[in-house]
Image (cartoon, rainbow, N blue to C red):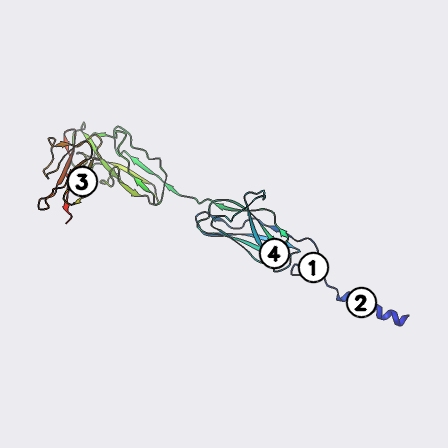
């Protein structure tokens, strides 16, 4: 018996020493496969390229198993949906019971919350949330300053502008006016008038002491700072602005002419023959048209205009036309 027992004991020892742990270091399983996802790491902002990651931890999932992402309409995870606009998901294969889910965003990604799971074989995570933050947009204002006005109020622009937006300069729509002898904000401060004299609004300046930068209706592109526009005052009305549908003409062309003046309440007089307008000239009220001379050997029309207010004339504005052949 002794000769028989000894080999059996040795053999049992050999069998015992030859066994291995059924759960290998690569993630082989002896139980149910599971996966859990961590929270989002990294920020994605709409309108900007970027990425965020989610750490996946697995159990009983074979090493090298690939992962797949499924998207849902809500955190309930009951209805699947398509991949969010501008988002690309990638998942690394399982290694050492871990994987990384990377969400890469293009500039077309839209702000919002997006819900997904990741699965490795039969193991599926709970719903995770990808957050795409709304871009922070910096806005700027345009403020109008009466710059020494004695009555009326400066117009108010309540629009918030982004860099690159087009700003349309407002008119003196709230009866902004000025009387007195102060020279502040005057285009020609050396030309003094009695204190009872009314000065004329002629436009807006980016400086309290500057000349006209913009007239009402003119546009400019918003930069990256707030803008203050100061009223510019003069001892004469602003010269009119003449706009034509065309200035290079051919015979029988019909041309539309529009005349405006920044000085609210000023009367505009014009001529079409090149002569200097007076208060006896045609009083402008609405845009008018003329038909170009039929003979190119003749001098094309010349439009001239003045603005008159409180018995004071503005400088003359003239637009000349040329033949297009």
Picture quadrant where residue 253 is located: top left
- Vertical order, 239 against 59 (above or below): above
Q: Are marks 3 and 4 in contact (CB under 8 Å)?
A: no
Q: Residues within 10 Å of mark 3 (few under 14, many from 20)?
A: some
Q: SS for tag 1?
A: loop
Q: Earlier in the sequence, mark 1 or mark 3?
A: 1
Q: How far apart are labels 2 and 1 at the CA level?
A: 22 Å
For residue 181, say whether it is visible. no
Q: Position of residue 52 (x, y in %)?
A: 51, 51
- Return the residue at label 4: 98
Taking depth in this image into account, of 66 and 169 the one nearest to the observer is 66
> Which residue does the numbered mark 2 point to in the structure image?
13
Q: Is residue 249 above or below residue 287?
A: below
Picture residue at 49% right of the left edge, 46% below the top: 132
Q: Which mark is residue 23?
A: 1
| Closer to viewer: mark 3 or mark 4 | 3
């Amino acid at each position: 018996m002794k000769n028989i027992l000894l080999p059996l004991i040795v053999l049992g020892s050999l069998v015992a020493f030859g066994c291995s742990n059924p759960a290998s270091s690569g993630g082989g399983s002896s139980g149910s496969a599971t996966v859990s996802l961590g929270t989002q790491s990294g920020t994605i902002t709409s309108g900007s390229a970027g990425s965020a990651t989610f750490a996946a931890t697995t159990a009983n999932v074979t090493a090298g198993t690939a992962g797949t992402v499924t998207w849902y309409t809500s955190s309930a995870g009951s209805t699947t949906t398509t991949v969010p606009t501008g988002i690309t998901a990638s998942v690394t294969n399982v290694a050492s019971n871990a994987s990384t889910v990377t969400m890469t965003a293009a500039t077309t990604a839209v702000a919002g919350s997006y819900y997904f799971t990741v699965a490795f074989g039969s193991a599926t995570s709970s719903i995770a949330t990808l957050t795409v933050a709304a871009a922070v947009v910096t806005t700027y204002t345009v403020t109008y300053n009466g710059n020494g006005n004695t009555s009326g109020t400066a117009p108010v622009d309540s629009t918030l502008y982004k860099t690159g937006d087009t700003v349309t300069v407002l008119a003196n729509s709230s009866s902004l006016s000025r009387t007195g002898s102060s020279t502040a904000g005057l285009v020609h401060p050396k030309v003094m008038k009695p204190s009872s004299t009314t000065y004329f609004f002629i436009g807006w300046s980016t400086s309290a002491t500057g000349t006209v930068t913009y007239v009402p209706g003119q546009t400019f592109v918003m930069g990256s700072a707030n803008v203050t526009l100061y009223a510019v005052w003069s001892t004469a009305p602003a010269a009119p602005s003449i706009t034509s549908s065309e200035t290079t003409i051919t015979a029988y062309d019909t041309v539309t002419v529009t005349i405006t003046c920044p000085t609210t309440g000023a009367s505009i007089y014009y001529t079409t023959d090149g002569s200097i307008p007076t208060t006896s000239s045609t009083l402008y009220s609405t845009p008018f048209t003329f038909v170009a001379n039929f003979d190119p050997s003749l001098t094309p029309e010349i439009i001239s205009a003045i603005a008159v207010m409180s018995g004071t004339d503005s400088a003359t504005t003239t637009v000349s036309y040329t033949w297009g052949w």
